[in-house]
Image (tube, rainbow, N blue to C red):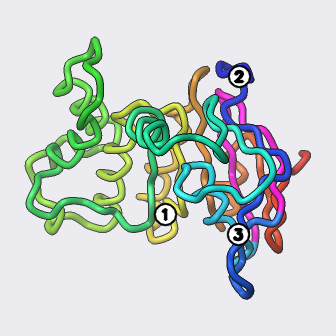
């Protein structure tokens, strides 16, 4: 796999659970760098399970799934931990902010155990806070922020790591239109020649702004041809 182009390759990848639990029966697609991808489909169809597979939170039970040059079926726990620390970031509906830390401190956590980079950490954090309109809230605590502001903090924390693969689960699901627009702009602007953004969403407008779609229905996932 050319890691500069194809970040994820799935060929009949599947995750089977106990009877009665919807998993992923078959997933076949490729996710290239410099791409934004919307994962769409009905509730309960397997979208979140698929996203968990892409983030190596769920191990496939069959097929082939190559993520950032790693075979997801046989990758070691140590390699998984490294990938999630250095190359993959998650954004969930739940913000997972630390209540006793300020906005700036929460975002700085995204750089925890990261290798030192050319840009000083403080400058990295400040740049992402500014991009998300949070500069004036850098010393505030999560409890003083609105839901939309807290989501933007969570996104800044994910983006500051400069991940190769950014995985988002309904990032605008609980936001009003104004905050949703800020969040979507930030996510899509993070796409680069070495990175990709993957977004699970029911929001048709958000899906339409992504470059590609993967449709999931009854546990079957495949690319949608435009």
Percent x, y of residue 143: 15, 68
Instruction: Name the chief secondary structure element in magenta.
Output: strand
Mark found first going from the N terminus, 1 or 3: 3
Q: In which quadrant is the N terminus drawn?
A: top right
| Residue drawn 21% across the image and 31% down it | 126
Return the mark for residue 5: 2
Callout in the foreground (1, 3): 3
The residue lying at 47 percent from left, 33 percent from top is 87
In front: 226, or 96? 96
Disc 3 versus disc 2: distance between alpha carbons? Answer: 26 Å
Confirm or deny contact between disc 3 and disc 2 (CB under 8 A). no
Point out residue 221 in the picture as x, y percentages from the top left corner.
81, 59
Q: Residues within 10 Å of mark 2 (few under 14, many from 20)?
A: some
- Report whether 218 appears left or right of 90: right
Name the secondary structure under disc 2: loop
Q: Which residues are magenta?
A: 26-41
Considering only vertical position in the picture, is 119 above or below 79? above
Q: Which residue is mark 3?
A: 46
- Residue at horizontal 69 percent and vertical 45 percent from the top: 37
């Amino acid at each position: 796999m050319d890691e500069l182009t194809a970040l994820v390759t799935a060929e009949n990848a599947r995750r089977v659970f106990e009877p009665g639990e919807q998993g992923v029966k078959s997933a076949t697609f490729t996710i290239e760098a410099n791409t934004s991808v919307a994962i769409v489909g009905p509730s309960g169809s397997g979208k979140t399970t698929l996203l968990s597979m892409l983030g190596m939170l769920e191990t496939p039970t069959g097929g082939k799934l190559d993520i950032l040059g790693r075979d997801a079926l046989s990758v070691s726990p140590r390699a998984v931990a490294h990938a999630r620390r250095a190359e993959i970031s998650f954004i969930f509906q739940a913000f997972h902010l630390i209540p006793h830390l300020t906005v700036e401190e929460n975002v700085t956590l995204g750089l925890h155990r990261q290798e030192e980079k050319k840009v000083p950490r403080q400058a990295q954090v400040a740049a992402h806070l500014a991009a998300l309109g949070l500069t004036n809230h850098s010393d505030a605590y999560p409890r003083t922020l609105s839901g939309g502001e807290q989501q933007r903090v969570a996104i800044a924390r994910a983006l500051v790591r400069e991940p190769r693969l950014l995985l988002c689960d309904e990032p605008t699901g609980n936001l009003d239109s104004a905050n949703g627009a800020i969040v979507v702009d930030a996510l899509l602007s993070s796409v680069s020649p070495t990175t990709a953004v993957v977004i699970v969403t029911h929001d048709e407008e958000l899906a339409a702004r992504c470059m590609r779609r993967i449709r999931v229905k009854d546990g079957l996932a495949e690319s949608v041809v435009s």
